[in-house]
Amino acid sequence: MLKWTVRSILLLVAVAAFSLPAAAQDTGDYALLPDAYVRGFGSYPVPADNASTIAKPDTVFFHINVTDFRGLLYGGMNYRRVTPDGKLKSYMFSTRIEALEIKGNFATIRAQAVYNGKPACMFVEVLDDTPSGDWAHFQANGCMLTVIYEDTAGGLNSGDVKVWTKPVPRAVAMGAGAIALPGPIVDKQRLGVFQFKAETTPAGPVGSLNYTDSPYNAATFGNSIFVPRWEKFGAAGNRAEMAGRGYWNGRPAMVVVKVQDNVDPRLQYLVAPPPDFFEVQAKLLNADPRLGAPEYVAGGPVIRGDIIVKTERAVTD
């Protein structure tokens, strides 16, 4: 009996050892949140087929639960249209979610579906929290066939729809300074001078780049690279990378910049860290494919100036 009791105690201790860390984990961990979802149910009135103005409207009842998690789409949708006397007039339900697009409080969902027992494609639009309330639009069509089986829309008179996207962690990278460039002139240092900023916003990345370098020799001209607005931007730790369409010596080019923030000039270090790092790449667009796209690459430690890379945890509701 004593032997069994000791084993029971050891088992309980082992279970507790595994359970307590799990219970202590943050269930709202940002990495575990979906990237986006549309969820809700409700109803809205639609005109009856009868042309009479005094005819009572039909009622559409629907349910949506579609989630995007790391590019994978889960969930489904269903739709029922009911006559004023409670008879089922038409129905559709999704069998596979094909696409989910969200812009602010507006979402579009496309899916393979079944409409009144036959294969169809389902197109759904929802609008969340407008001044006049939520709104929904359902359509069943013939996919590749140019035929629409059913198309209804209306403001919800019951229920609620939630359109949600994961907040993007705020990140900013900015800097101004110069890097050393190789050159034939020994008594004069060639420089690549830069000034840039990139920042995440709900509307996408913003910021710009100005970069110029010294002529290689007296017989050549320096390079100039300009990006009016970034199209991509990401930051992790002390590193950041940004890309966008810009101009290299006045010609359209795709520009990529990579930076590292290694030094804070406000701090004193017992052991000097490596200097900040800056690299720029520009590749001409619409170049002659027979000649290959000319490319400019320059990078190295920052010998003047400073680079800052900061990230902040996203605020989730």
Image (cartoon, grey):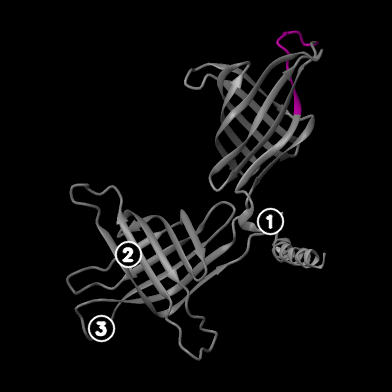
| Near-viewer residue (259 or 66) | 66
Residue named by callout 2: 224
**Could you tell me the amino acid type at mark 3?**
Lys
Magenta stretch bounds: 43-54
Q: Residues within 10 Å of mark 3 (few under 14, many from 20)?
A: few
Marked residue nearer the N-terminal end (2 or 1): 2
Q: Position of residue 82 (x, y in %)?
A: 75, 17
Residue named by callout 3: 188
| Near-viewer residue (93 or 270) | 93
Judge whether residue 51 is colored magenta: yes
Quarter of the image where one finds residue 127: top right
Q: Position of residue 126 (x, y in %)?
A: 66, 34
Q: Position of residue 173 (x, y in %)?
A: 50, 67
| Near-viewer residue (51 or 278) | 278
Which residue lies at the image location 17% right of the left edge and 71% below the top edge?
Answer: 219
Which residue lies at the image location 35% right of the left edge and 57% below the top edge?
Answer: 247
Vertical side of 174 occupied by 95: above or below: above
